[in-house]
């Protein structure tokens, strides 16, 4: 895995299990650190919710892998525009697919942030 990126062992029931430890609610993983993320729905998501990622910048984050919840949906335009201005890519898909892809990409050493809405 990239540096010390946590592994997502499981997801569902309102949270995630990372490296064997349960985390309730949505997660933001940046710089190999997972932290609670207050976002509960895609419609409520704003650029402010990804401020730590934008502040980290392109040097640290190639793209954000956004788990949109139980179904895929288009993130708000303002969020997409803010990431584009920062030079950070965005990939979005339902949270189960994002959790699985996160593990694959970090094992390849990719520099990404994961923003995962709990299901």
Image (cartoon, grey):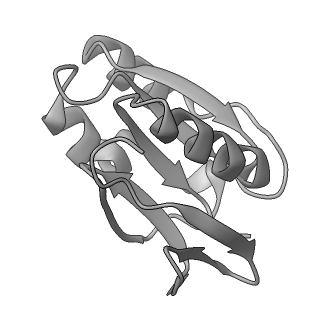
| Residue 87 at x, y percent in the picture | 29, 12
Q: Quadrant of the N terminus?
A: top left
Q: Nearer the viewer, residue 86 or 29?
A: 29
Point 40% across, 58% down: residue? 28
| Residue 91 at x, y percent in the picture | 59, 26
Looking at the image, residue 49 lies above or below residue 13: above
Outermost residue toward the right in this view: 71
State which quadrant residue 50 falls in. Answer: top left
In this rendering, position of residue 18 left or right of residue 86: right
The number of numbered discs placed on residues in the rendered structure image is 0
In this rendering, position of residue 64 left or right of residue 99: left
Point 51% across, 60% down: residue? 7
Decide if residue 118 is in sight here. Answer: no
| Residue 90 at x, y percent in the picture | 51, 24
Q: Quadrant of the C terminus?
A: bottom right
Looking at the image, residue 15 lies above or below residue 103: below
State which quadrant residue 44 falls in. Answer: bottom right
Decide if residue 101 is in sight here. Answer: yes
In this rendering, position of residue 108 left or right of residue 30: right
Point 76% across, 45% down: residue? 97
| Residue 101 at x, y percent in the picture | 66, 39
Point 20% across, 30% down: residue? 60
Looking at the image, residue 7 lies above or below residue 93: below
In this rendering, position of residue 103 left or right of residue 93: left
């Amino acid at each position: 895995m990239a540096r010390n990126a946590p592994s997502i062992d499981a997801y569902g029931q309102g949270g995630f299990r990372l490296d064997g430890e349960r985390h309730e609610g949505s997660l933001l993983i940046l710089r190999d650190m997972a932290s609670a993320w207050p976002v509960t729905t895609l419609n409520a998501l704003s650029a402010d919710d990804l401020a730590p990622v934008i502040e980290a910048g392109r040097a640290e984050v190639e793209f954000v892998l956004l788990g949109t919840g139980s179904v895929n949906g288009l993130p708000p335009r303002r969020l997409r525009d803010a990431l584009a201005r920062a030079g950070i890519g965005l990939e979005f898909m339902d949270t189960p697919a994002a959790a699985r892809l996160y593990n694959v990409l970090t094992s390849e050493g990719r520099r990404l942030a994961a923003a995962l809405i709990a299901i």
